[in-house]
Image (spheres, rainbow, N blue to C red):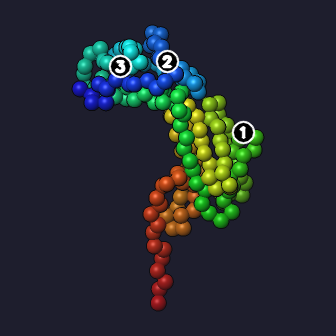
Amino acid sequence: MSRIGKMPIALPKGVEVKKDGKLVSVKGPKGVLTREIPDTFTVTIENNHVLCMPKVVSADIKALWGLYRMLIQNMAIGVSDGYKIGLEVVGVGYKAELKGKDLKVACGYSDPVNFTCLPGIVFTVEGQTKIFIEGIDKELVGRVASSIRSVRPPEPYKGKGIRYIGEVVRSKAGKAAVK
């Protein structure tokens, strides 16, 4: 049995869950999220708790049980509180700025890299070195943050690049001078 899958999901205040066939929709103060749940799972809603249970227990189903439970929980947290990921731009001449709703990052290339704002995502920039990505969908927020970081990941010699706030970059020693 899945330890995570067995636990009921306690819904935050102001969050409603509705099941319509395969679709589970979660509505809260920040918006609405929907996700398709396979037929092999039953989702029951009672007393402000949601329970995700498999219809038949097999090795394949047990592997996905905790996943679908956490996906529903992430939807409930997203529509009530939202998700926020911070990135830090480190390097001489490296900077980030907003152009309307879109993000423009200068990180050592001849031209700045532009990121268009996807629906459900909000970019904010503090100073010129901190970027914050906010939204209600945890998967989308993480994917956008990862794509921004992948433009110039932190390098291990000087530490220049784009990193998550709080990420530790282990620096390597460069070449030793030969005497």
The answer to whether any part of residue 126 appears in the image is: yes
- Residue 131 on image: x %, y %: 62, 49
Secondary structure of the residue carrying numbered label 1: loop
* N-term-proximal mark, 1 vs 3: 3
* Three-letter amino acid code of the residue under disc 2: Glu
Disc 1: which residue: 101
Please name which of the two marks, 1 or 2, marks the residue nearer to the observer. Answer: 2
- Residue 141 on image: x %, y %: 55, 37
Secondary structure of the residue carrying numbered label 3: strand
Query: What's the distance in space between the residues labelled 2 and 3, CA to CA?
Result: 14 Å
Disc 2: which residue: 16
> In terms of image quadrants, where is residue 123?
top right
Disc 3: which residue: 51
- Considering depth in this image, is 60 or 79 the residue closer to the camera? 79
Left or right: 173 as drawn, with respect to 152: left
Q: Is residue 15 above or below residue 140?
A: above
Query: What's the distance in space between the residues labelled 1 and 3, CA to CA?
Result: 38 Å
